[in-house]
Image: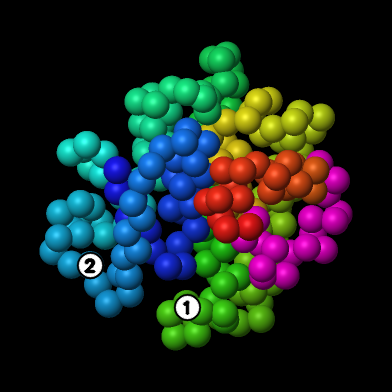
Amino acid sequence: MRLYTHPISVFPFRVKIALHEKGLVFEEVSTDLSSGASEAFLGLNPFAQIPVLEDDGFTLAESMAILEYLDEKYPEPSLRPESLEARATMRMLMCWSTDYWYAHWKGWLAPKLGERGDPWTQESLRDARRGLCTHLDVIEKQLGSQEWLAGEYSLADICYAPLILSLHRVGFDDEFEKRSELSRWIEQLSARNAVINALGL
């Protein structure tokens, strides 16, 4: 099994967490796409995005598709809730973690990426921080009195784990302190061996 990653992308970490949760052995291939994708890589994903997983002759891109594939092919331990409603909630959260997070994340990182980042202003940074904080509020509310995002530990938690834990490095600890359920959840995530091994905590 081979996982293609990128030096600064958080999305492959989702897949790495799931692989560690399931105890699967894999080779990590760090793929720098900053100067464009090679023809060989475009053969794996024509949209030149990572992660990409190769498993026994089968190639799959998109982190959410990879996560569902892994949980179906390697069902122990299961990373999806039992009930229909909880699984639907899990998939909703997985979509939220991808569709509504990245633009704000990219905006907040812009000054830290130098020439690789987008143009930015103080106003764009405020907007990006506000967007990320709104997302943290959504997670705080979703957790409520639940231990995990969809009730039990699932792919929803795995999708959000590298995103939220990355905020520690870019000036959001004060925002965590304002949200008790989020802080509790982060502490639980950070104690999981799969998260520790995947993120190098």
- Residue tagged by mark 1? 117
In the depicted view, which residue is nearer to us: 65 or 58?
58
**Vertical comparison of 76 with 29: above or below:** above
Q: Quadrant of residue 125?
A: bottom right
Q: Nearer the viewer, residue 22 or 177?
A: 22
Q: Amino acid at mark 2?
A: Ala
Q: How is the image coloured?
A: rainbow
Q: What range of the chain is rendered magenta?
A: 165-182
Residue at the spot of label 2: 37
Judge whether residue 82 can be spotted in this image. yes
Location of residue 76 in the rendering, given as x and y in whole percent from the top left corner: 47, 23
- Residue at 52 percent of width and 67 percent of height: 106
Q: Residue at x 33, y 74 (%)?
A: 34
Identify the image quadrant of residue 58: top left
Q: Secondary structure at mark 1?
A: loop
Q: Is residue 106 magenta?
A: no
